[in-house]
Amino acid sequence: MGRFVLAIDQGTTGSTVALMDARGVLRGSVNFEFPQIYPQPGWVEHRPADIWRSVGKGISAILRKKICKPSDIVAIGITNQRETALLWDKDTGEPLNNAVVWQCRRTTDFCESLRGAGHEQSVRRKTGLVLDPYFSASKFRWLLKNTRGISRLLQSGRVAAGTIDSFLIWQLSGGETHVSDVSNASRTSLMNLKTVSWDEQMLKLFQVPREILPEIVPSSAILGRTRGVKGLPDGIPISGVAGDQQAALFGQACFSVGDAKCTFGTGSFIVMNTGAELLKSDAGLLTTIAWQLGEKAKPVYALEGGAFVCGAAVQWLRDGLKIIKTSPAVEALARQVADHGGVEFVPALTGLGAPHWSPEARGTVTGLTRGSERGHIARATLDAMALQNVDILRAMEADLGKRMKPLRVDGGAAANDLLMQIQANVLGRRLIRPAVIETTVAGACYLAGLGAGLWQSPAQVKEMWSAEREFSVQMSPAARRKRHASWSNALQRTLL
């Protein structure tokens, strides 16, 4: 039946498992959600067992579709929610605590204390990241200080720490492999971007022992092999791994310097390929590693800006305000009005990310009048999703010193034609939506296929990518400036 790549896309709210054939065609996918845990305001957790169970269910479900035989799977690729941190027992494989999710703000006070002690610049210089509870290092520290029995386990060498990619590889390999790829490691605040290794100064600053961390490995190479996974033969190479945003960049075939994509998911994330150049940001963006193709290759760097709440804002309209029954219904509701009607929604529901970096900011809805309707709130939500990205892209252009190329878009909300047109209008740039909108899955498949030798080069991968639709700008510069000024005023109120 041919050769297939199995991809695991482990996201914030669920896990997707998919199969891609040797022609680069996604032949099927399944998704299983798992519970979100909110112990306190601003805290977000996942049960690692729920994550692994959702992956296992996904593998079983995709195999039941009879797309291929398990023996036809020649490689496994993984892409994952990135900064989420967890600990597990090396002897038993059992989690030692709930995973602390990337959205969680519980370490805000600790990060503020480091900033007050003057450590911000050294963290940025070495890791490319800002001092913020978003990243993994402070989460690891919290787990090490708040997990029962941790001292005894540390003394006996039984503690393993990692991001979700590490946990999945450990599980898939039957506990034989403890690694993390460069893209995920670059999101921890513990890896030195220049040396691509754990940094002793950062380990000391965040109080994380080196011995509990995974080995840092390339994004595309044979990193481990399956052992004891229900439904899968032993020995399938795990040969492609990247954090979700880097995987989306690869899945969009953004292989040239200056290529950029925006993924509309739970949050929205814009990543731009800067090639071999480790470009430092002066505008509140992050420097990160996009990928490394093989052990002998040099890493490819990127600039990134992320808004923490994007699709999650629509989920809030659905689950919190209950003004829509399903997330896709937001488009029809927003089309009932001509524009936002003066209503502004700043979705700082878990603080503000790039380029503002205000963890204490909270969401606001302003500009309400007696004439305001549900449609205005829905339209203001779509506008906010797009306007957050304008702030990020303007910062990116300031760092680059030039205008960006057309922006490639993906993620679930990229299927919303109204949102895409709003984004093109307020950004003043053409958008390109790919034929395969599941670009994180595609990126994981491409990396795994390259790592296992199914495909020979990124150029071969690029031939498999194609566009589905483009969105041109349909707003005048004057109207664009007026719309952004209204947004900026609302944003300033949130930041006060």
Image (spheres, rainbow, N blue to C red):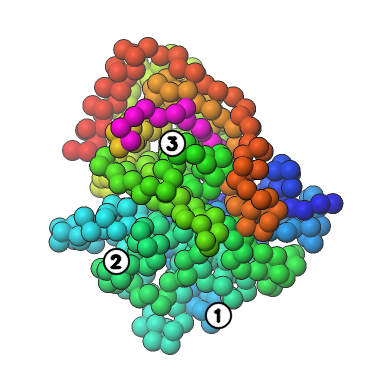
Pointers 3 and 2 in contact (C-beta within 8 Å): no
User: How far from the left and from the top, in percent, is residue 96?
Assistant: 46, 74
If you read the primary sequence from the N terminus, does the residue marked by circle 1 or circle 2 appear first?
1
Q: Residue at 33% of width from left, 32% of height from top?
A: 397
Q: Residue at 69% of width from left, 73% of height from top?
A: 228
Quadrant in the rendering for residue 400: top left
Residue with the mark numbered 2: 202
Pointers 3 and 1 in contact (C-beta within 8 Å): no
Under circle 2, the secondary element is helix
Under circle 3, the secondary element is loop
Q: CA separation, marks 1 and 2? A: 29 Å
Question: In the rendered view, does 244 fall on the left or right side of 366?
Answer: right
The type of residue carrying mark 1 is Thr
The type of residue carrying mark 3 is Gly
Magenta extent: 400-412
The type of residue carrying mark 2 is Met
Q: CA separation, marks 3 and 2? A: 30 Å
- Give above or below for 283 relative to 185: above
Residue with the mark numbered 1: 92
